[in-house]
Image (cartoon, rainbow, N blue to C red):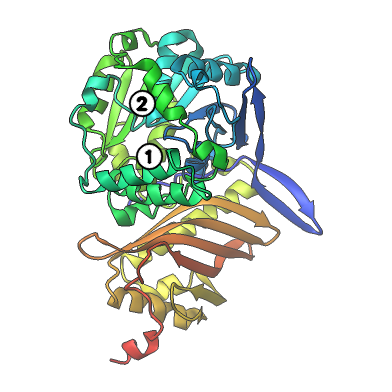
Amino acid sequence: MKTFLIGLLLFCTTSFVGNAQIVKLKSSKGFVQTDDYVKLHYQLLGEGSDTLVVVHGGGTFGSAYLVPDLTPLAAHHKLLFYDQAGAGYSTVVKDTTRYSMNNTIKDIEEIRKHFKLKKLNLLCHSTGGLICGYYATTYPDKVKSMMLIAPLPAAAAMTNGWVNKNDSLTALLLEQNKKIYENKPVDSTKACWDYYSLWIRGFAASYAEARNIWGNICNCNQANLTSPFSYYKMKSIGNWDITSQLANVKARVLILAGDNDAIPFASFEHWNNSLPNSSLLNFKGAGHLPNADEPTAFFLAIETFLKGNTPDESVMDAFGAGVILPDDLKESSYLRARAAVIEVENELVRLANRSEWEGMSKLYTSDGIIYPPGAPPIIGRNAIATFWKTVSKRGMHSLQLHLVDLEISGDLLIANGKYSMRNEQNEILDIGKFIAIYRNENNKWYLQTDMFNSSLETRSPLEVPDYLTILKE
């Protein structure tokens, strides 16, 4: 298998608990006071030399829905997530005149000044893409680069005839929307999840793929869930069209979008044609969050762009559990260990896809354990080889792994990430989260415990409580 090791290379913080050294991704939270009464909640991840300011989209939810799926970028960069006024954990705004595009871009300026950033690298999703477009046309000298993930159209006219992929969802979405905005439910968080569970089916590549999005979209103040901030913000710009102003944007721009999004791909092409220094990547088959649908290609594209190069369609050939850049291998023992773990994950995938079950089992410790969905523990190398062979008999044709985060404690390493198992037609059989515990033996990392937690609502066809019986047939 062609392997690109794309790394979560976590610039990390070190502390000590007992005699064990703990190494994990640095994180901090706080508030930025604006020039009025609003406080903007933020979360900072990573310790890279540059900072990416993440501008979320959406209605009343904040930045939390983006944090887990963008965490791999904290490998080489600081990620600065913030909640817009009236969203997430930022101040609950009662004066609807505060909800305007002008105030929103002023708040980005407050963020820039508070963190003493001379120029901004903006990473913007959905409605956040339009907000960044407004910011870049207002403060062109304050933007170094922009990465627009599935941005809202730059002109309102391009939303005409824009219909959710599943038309039958429209009435249901309106009904759930009323529960949030009009009826003021006691449990607005539940109403939010009821709404989201319908909404995502129109924006994800498929319902099963939607289960690969880790962000908690309803992780915010309940008072902000019932806030009308998105409605009034969009109302403030009316029949918007910033097409002509985009010609004045000086920054380099990368547009990352899928052709299976509810937003017509023509609107992404319109952004690309309107900006003087931009490029557009089509993540074919991806939905509204290509970073979740095609993470390896997505993060390779971002890293390539931030190094000053223009990624092209060749990044779509990227495979692997994570990315390691060449200089990373010269760094700390943590980074070297992390690289070794990614190599193990990639080797596990390579062997699985070649049906080499005995080889797979040798990547585990002699007392290794697998906890599969809906099945008893699989203990020992012989049983592990049997397990993977049985999963193949149940229809798994290919295995995919993607590392999200990790933590080291002495000779043990805990990694968490995403997995998917597909049949010969490339259809998802199972998808979900994995937690892998590695043990260092003679300066080499081996899998000690593998836990797979299916994200599917219905039982996975790969559940194997009777795997030994099957192999005797």
Q: Nearer the viewer, residue 376 or 38?
A: 38
Specify few, some or many for label 2: CA neighbours under 10 Å numbering under 14, 14-19, or 20 or more.
Answer: many
Q: Which residue sits at x=54%, y=27%?
A: 85
Disc 1, SS: helix
Residue picked out by circle 2: 254
Q: Is residue 335 above or below residue 38?
A: below
Image location of residue 196, percent across then percent down: 39, 47
Picture quarter containing residue 12?
top right
Q: Which residue sits at x=41%, y=35%?
A: 58
Quarter of the picture holding the N terminus: bottom left
Tell me which amino acid carries mark 1: Phe
Q: Earlier in the sequence, mark 1 or mark 2?
A: 2
Q: Which mark is residue 347?
A: none
Tell me which amino acid carries mark 2: Leu
Q: Residue furthest left?
A: 161
Q: Is residue 408 above or below residue 325?
A: below
Image location of residue 212, percent across then percent down: 39, 53
Q: Which mark is residue 298?
A: 1
- Residue 199 makes an appearance in the image: no
Q: Nearer the viewer, residue 279 or 324?
A: 279
Q: Is residue 365 above or below residue 443?
A: below
Q: Is residue 11 left or right of residue 216?
A: right
